[in-house]
Image: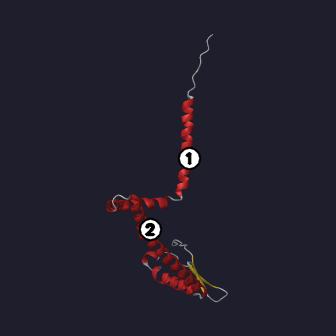
């Protein structure tokens, strides 16, 4: 009796190649997760590099092929033209946010915010809700006022519209 030897369906070389490919895909996935944090910065860097490449080529010719000096000059100029205004805009934005916080805090303390809300609610109920298209809505209970311990009047808006009852 002769026994027949069966060959494996996957050879050792194929198994090693599959394992290598699986490890490679896993490492590629991990690298993508690491770089995802920097994706916005990398995209902007690519856009700026593409936009400034023709200028870089002209400056290389102007500086007689000194690529290192050209790269240094382009980096300095780009930093001054892009990062400088961005930092100035950020400083203005931060100061405006601080002003807005102080203004809103003073408004809440002096009940001006509640008065503004009450005026807005009365305008909405008198002007907008009298529109013919909104005439069928039951507006009772949409705006309700209640007092607080310090005497301010607050108005809450409940966005519940009930269909007209027939």
Q: Is residue 143 left or right of residue 65?
A: right
Look at the numbered discs 2 and 1 and tell me whether their residues touch, using CB distance below 8 Å.
no
What is the secondary structure assignment of the residue under circle 1? helix
Label 2 or label 1, whichever lies nearer to me, is: 2
SS state under label 2: helix
Quadrant of residue 106 within the rendered picture: bottom right
Residue sitting nearer the eye, 76 or 132: 76
Nearer to me, 64 or 108:
64
Is 103 situated above or below 70? Answer: below
Where 34 sits versus 78, above or below? Answer: above
Residue 126 marker? none
Q: Which residue is mark 1?
A: 27
- Could you say where residue 5 lies in the image, as x and y percent from the top left? 59, 18
Mark 2 closeness class: few <14, some 14–19, many ≥20 residues within 10 Å = few
How many marks do you count on the picture?
2
Q: Residue furthest right?
A: 149
Query: Tag 1 or tag 2, which sits nearer the N-term?
Result: 1
* Residue shown at 57% from the left, 33% from the top: 15
């Amino acid at each position: 009796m002769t026994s027949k030897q069966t060959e494996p369906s996957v050879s050792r070389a194929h198994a090693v190649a599959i394992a290598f490919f699986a490890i490679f895909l896993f490492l590629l996935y991990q690298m993508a997760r690491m770089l995802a944090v920097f994706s916005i910065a990398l995209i902007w860097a690519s856009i700026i590099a593409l936009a400034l490449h023709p200028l870089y080529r002209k400056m290389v010719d102007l500086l007689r092929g000194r690529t290192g000096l050209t790269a240094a000059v382009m980096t300095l100029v780009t930093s001054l033209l892009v990062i400088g205004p961005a930092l100035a805009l950020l400083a203005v934005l931060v100061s405006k946010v601080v002003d807005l916080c102080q203004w809103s805090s003073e408004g809440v303390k002096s009940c001006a915010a509640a008065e503004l809300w009450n005026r807005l609610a009365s305008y909405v109920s008198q002007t907008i809700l009298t529109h013919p298209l909104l005439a069928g809505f039951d507006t009772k209970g949409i705006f309700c006022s209640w007092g607080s311990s310090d005497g301010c009047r607050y108005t809450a808006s409940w966005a519940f519209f009930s269909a007209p009852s027939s």
